[in-house]
Amino acid sequence: MEVATWLTMVAFAYGLGVFWYDLLPGKLPDMPWRVAAYPFAVMVLAEAFAPIGPKFLEFHPGAAVIAALIGCVIDWIITYFRHPQAIESLEMRKALAQS
């Protein structure tokens, strides 16, 4: 794989990641490269095992669009089940008096 192909796939994965994350019922991750991580990984797997559609710069954009959607859905499911929520405020409980 050439450097230009790799850079194009990273840029394509980031752009499609932002697109799919905006359409899914989740929110965009705080770390910008997390948006491209799962779509890029699934794009590489799709390129290796299911290269469908026409080629552009030695990769298949049709398969990349579908793979990026699958990667975003996988990341959304993982994030949903991990429950990464920030604590907005501390709980205000009175300490029970021990006698």
Image: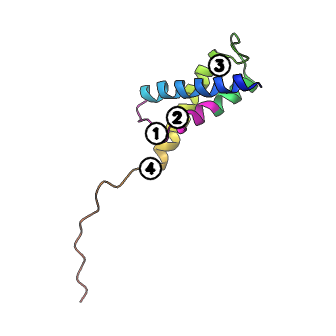
Q: Is residue 86 above or below residue 35?
A: below
Mark 3 neighbour class, 10 Å CA radius: few under 14, some 14 to 19, many 20 or more = many
Q: Which residue is mark 2?
A: 35
Where residue 91 sits: x, y (%)? 27, 63
Q: Which residue is mark 3?
A: 63
Q: In the rendered image, which quarter contains the C terminus?
A: bottom left
Question: Residue 37 in magenta?
Answer: yes
Label 2 vs 4, first from the N-terminus: 2
What secondary structure is found at the residue carrying circle 1? loop
Find out whether the residues at labels 2 and 1 contact each other: C-beta distance under 8 Å: yes
Q: Is residue 62 above or below residue 16?
A: above
Whole-number angstrom distance, CA of label 3 to CA of label 2: 18 Å
- In the rendered image, the residue lying farthest to the bottom is 99
For the record, the magenta segment spans: 24-40
Where residue 65 sits: x, y (%)? 58, 20
Whole-number angstrom distance, CA of label 3 to CA of label 1: 24 Å
Q: Which label lies toward us, 3 or 1?
A: 1
- In the rendered image, the residue lying farthest to the front is 3
Q: Which residue is mark 4?
A: 84
What secondary structure is found at the residue carrying circle 2? helix
